[in-house]
Amino acid sequence: MSKEVKSYLSVFFIISALLTIVILKMEVRRLGYQVFKLGQVERTYRDDYRKLEMRFAQLTRPERIEIYAQTKLELKEANKGQIIQLIAGKVAFKN
């Protein structure tokens, strides 16, 4: 090969290497932004989950369930010594 062809090839390889470096840095930056956005989405979902857990805890408080049972379902608190036996879908009371 002539000296002129070797110089063109070396310039071509240098330009190719530099272009490859630029493209890879752009890809790294793009992936960094994507990771940042996914982190924000994950935090949002985690916050929503915590809010739902708190709401569930509020709704399933024993005091709230007892009040709901007494007002809406008209259930009464069992008396001392009262036996409630469930048999195949039937309820038997003994005082």
Image: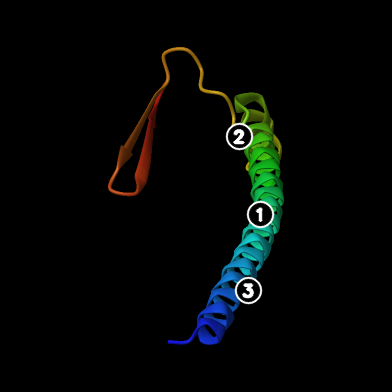
Q: CA distance from mark 3 to mark 1?
A: 26 Å
In the rendered structure, find residue 15 and report the number of the disc placed on it: 3
Q: Secondary structure at mark 1?
A: helix
Coordinates of residue 50 in the picture (x, y in percent): 66, 38
Q: Secondary structure at mark 2?
A: loop
**Position above or below: 53 against 63:** below
**Position above or below: 20 against 95:** below
Q: CA distance from mark 3 to mark 2?
A: 67 Å
Residue 92 relative to residue 24: left or right: left
**Position above or below: 23 against 40:** below
Name the residue type under label 3: Ile
- In the rendered view, how is the structure colored? rainbow
The quarter of the picture where residue 43 lies is top right
Of badges 2 and 1, the one in the foreground is 1
Residue drawn at the location 68% of the way across and 58% of the way down: 29
Within 10 Å of disc 1 (Cα), the crowding (few <14, some 14-19, many 20+) is few
Residue sticking out furthest to the front = 3
Name the residue type under label 2: Thr
Q: Which residue is mark 1?
A: 32
| Chain-order first, disc 2 or disc 1 | 1
Coordinates of residue 61 in the picture (x, y in percent): 63, 28
Name the residue type under label 1: Gly
Q: Which residue is mark 2?
A: 60
Residue drawn at the location 43% of the way across and 87% of the way down: 1
